[in-house]
Amino acid sequence: MNVLEINDTGLLLSDGARVIAESPGFAALDGKTLHVGAAARARSRLDPRRAFSRFWYQLDATLPAPAGAARSHADLAFAHLQSLIDAAANEPLILSAPGTLTREQLAILLGLIEASGLRAEGLVDTAVASATQVETLETTLHLDVELHRFVLTVLRGGAEVSRLRIEEVSKPGITVIWDALSRVAAQAFVQQTRFDPLHNASTEQTLFDALPGWLALLGGSPNAVLELVAGTRTHRASVSRDDLVKRLVDPFEDVAGGVDQHGRPRPVTLLLSARAAAIPGLADHVEHATGITAVRLDPLAPARGALAQAARIAVPGAGLAYVTRLPGIARRADPTADASSPTHVLLGDRALALPRREGDAMLPLSHLRGGLPGALRLLDGRLWIDGAGDESVVLNGKPARLPLRVGLGDRVEVGGALLRLIEVVG
């Protein structure tokens, strides 16, 4: 049994250990020929008016004008599904689909699957399947990015993972990352080589084709040398991750705000899909803004989760019921936790003892200085500064938000005061 993950970024067919086939979520018309997947993406900047990337995002919409024989987004999605018939090899499938599909879109999807000839025997929520692969707390969030939106799924984690709600936390999605990197790269090429890759459609398409690889470079290094072949020449330009991140502050802030709002009460498990984790700077921004350390999932986490629970998802005779609840893994005590922990909080020459046991009363920061917002409390063995979340806070020189997880040696600036977390021995 294999898994077909459906997302508006594309289709991913795998057996949980390897990718069998992958097809980007694009369609393009060339004369009377309709291309889908990689072939369509490779034409999307040559003739943008005849290129389509919203058919999975708006599955229930009609096209403004016919695209060959296609009259609706569902027609394009059907062609996309059929392009994987040979790779599927008539093997039974579990479908992994995002929670963003409306009831109407889900009904259309099931109709397309039935008509396509694919052997689908189960249907599961992608975020739920992914979350069963790792230890989770009761409050669990799954962040994913689609072509046209960032999506936060709120889950109940632990021994059973269940979907509670879904929220779009920013629009657009990966397209805003591509657009930002296109501008950063084009500016670098112009300044460093006097070559403008956006000058004509052909070189713009070449640049667009290179974007996924360039994102991977910047995800693994603070600086990268980008190469672009135009005609017989290879142009090279150096860019930094910071150049890109500066253009993405607004969507990153939207995402961090959504995580901060829904990740209450702390502590919380934050899962990043492989698509979200691959965006340079996003995980760091969210972690610094919220104090939540993210768990980065790999691309096949949804497939492994679905296959591990195949008996509950693909039930003979049950039809394609959309599964949004599965057994999970409750988080155990952290064996790597540092034995050293702060005992006091210091402001100037005054130190106050911190809560040491679960259930101890919180320590309001106003006990250190009148008017300071927030309080120190112990949750799940971790020390947190709690608060409304809109105060200006700096943790170890970096902007942050309340509530904020802190530890020994941390320096926190809040309300104009510098707090230090210290250990008193003897």
Image: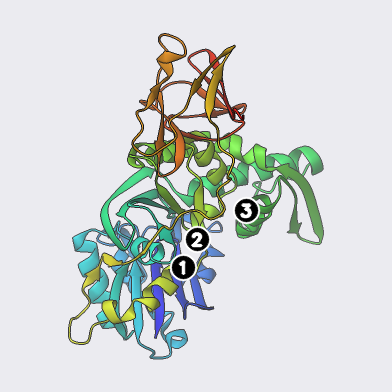
Residue 84, horizontal then vertical, whole percent = 43, 80
Which quadrant is the C terminus positioned in? Answer: top right
Q: Residue furthest top?
A: 370
The residue lying toward the viewer, choosing from 58 and 6, is 6
Residue 338, horizontal then vertical, whole percent = 58, 45
Q: Residue furthest bottom?
A: 90
The alpha-carbon separation of the residues under discs 2 and 3 comes to 17 Å
- Horizontal side of 300 relative to 194 (left or right) equals left
Residue 383, horizontal then vertical, whole percent = 46, 35
Tell me the residue at 53%/14% (across/down). Answer: 417
Mark 3, residue position: 215
Which quadrant is the N terminus positioned in? Answer: bottom left
The residue lying toward the viewer, choosing from 119 and 155, is 155
Mark 1, residue position: 301
Residue 41, horizontal then vertical, whole percent = 52, 64
As shown in the figure, which amino acid type bears the numbered disc 1? Ala
Answer whether residue 194 is visible to the viewer in this image. yes
Q: Secondary structure at mark 3?
A: helix
Residue 63 against residue 30 in the figure, above or below: above
Tell me the residue at 60%/55% (across/down). Answer: 208
- Badge count: 3
Crowd tier of the residue under label 3, counting other residues whose Cα lies within 10 Å: few below 14, some 14–19, many 20 or above: many
- Horizontal side of 139 relative to 253 (left or right) equals left
Q: Which mark is residue 297?
A: 2
Q: Which mark is residue 258?
A: none
Tell me the residue at 46%/68% (across/down). Answer: 301
Crowd tier of the residue under label 2, counting other residues whose Cα lies within 10 Å: few below 14, some 14–19, many 20 or above: many
First in residue order: circle 2 vs circle 3: 3
Answer whether residue 250 is visible to the viewer in this image. no
The alpha-carbon separation of the residues under discs 1 and 3 comes to 21 Å
Q: Secondary structure at mark 1?
A: helix
The residue lying toward the viewer, choosing from 345 and 170, is 345
